[in-house]
Amino acid sequence: MPQTVITLSTHGQGLYELTGQAAEFVRAASSGAGEGLLTVFVRHTSCSLLIQENADPDVKTDLNAFFRRLVPPSSDPSMRWIVHTAEGPDDMPAHIKAALTQVSISVPVMRGRLALGTWQGIYLFEHRDRPHRREIILHLSA
């Protein structure tokens, strides 16, 4: 069963699309004719994965704003209850955001292609402020 690891470099909080890399992996691994299931897994606890609209950039802007309001940095007075602060004011909120979303997603593969909807894309959702190198495992099963 084919699998690979891709690395994404982030430059702070936000959504980073990886649909193209996933689609290329599926094309190469399935020889263009297979059906199966692509599993996408991120090997970190302070970022997550989403399938989300990839047509209008305002969607990314609004999602970032929503999650910043939902889980502000631990330096915000409303977050005084947070104990884990050793790695900075964005770290524990990043763990909370990852717990609210997901670190693994599955996408059906039909005729050697991702069966995503017209406006759907696969995103790494970075929850930390500083740059990171994130490892994502792509696994194709028949």
Image (spheres, rainbow, N blue to C red):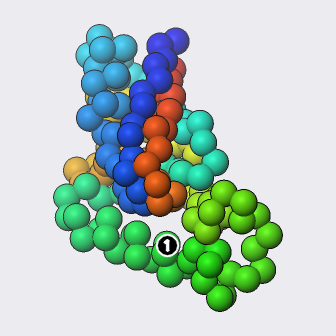
Mark 1 nearby-residue class (10 Å; few <14, some 14–19, many ≥20): some
The residue depicted at 26 percent of the width and 16 percent of the height is 32
The residue depicted at 66 percent of the width and 88 percent of the height is 78
The residue depicted at 60 percent of the width and 83 percent of the height is 76
| Residue 48 relative to residue 27: left or right | right
Question: Residue 66: which quarter of the image?
Answer: bottom left
Whole-percent x, y for residue 107 in the image = 44, 38
Question: Residue 44: which quarter of the image?
Answer: top right
Whether residue 50 is visible: no
Whole-percent x, y for residue 26 in the image = 34, 23
Count of marks placed on residues:
1
| Frontmost residue, 99 versus 108 | 99
Residue that protrudes farthest toward the bottom in the picture? 77
Whether residue 90 is visible: yes
Where 125 sits versus 90, above or below?
above
| Frontmost residue, 110 versus 120 | 120
| Residue 89 relative to residue 5: left or right | right
Task: Inspect the image, locate mark 1, and give the three-letter code of the amino acid beneath it.
Answer: Phe
| Residue 23 relative to residue 95: left or right | left
Residue that protrudes farthest toward the left in the picture? 55
Whole-percent x, y for residue 60 in the image = 32, 65
Whole-percent x, y for residue 91 in the image = 62, 60
Write down the residue under mark 1. 67
Where 21 sits versus 142, above or below?
below
Question: Which structural element holds mark 1?
Answer: helix
The residue depicted at 52 percent of the width and 12 percent of the height is 1
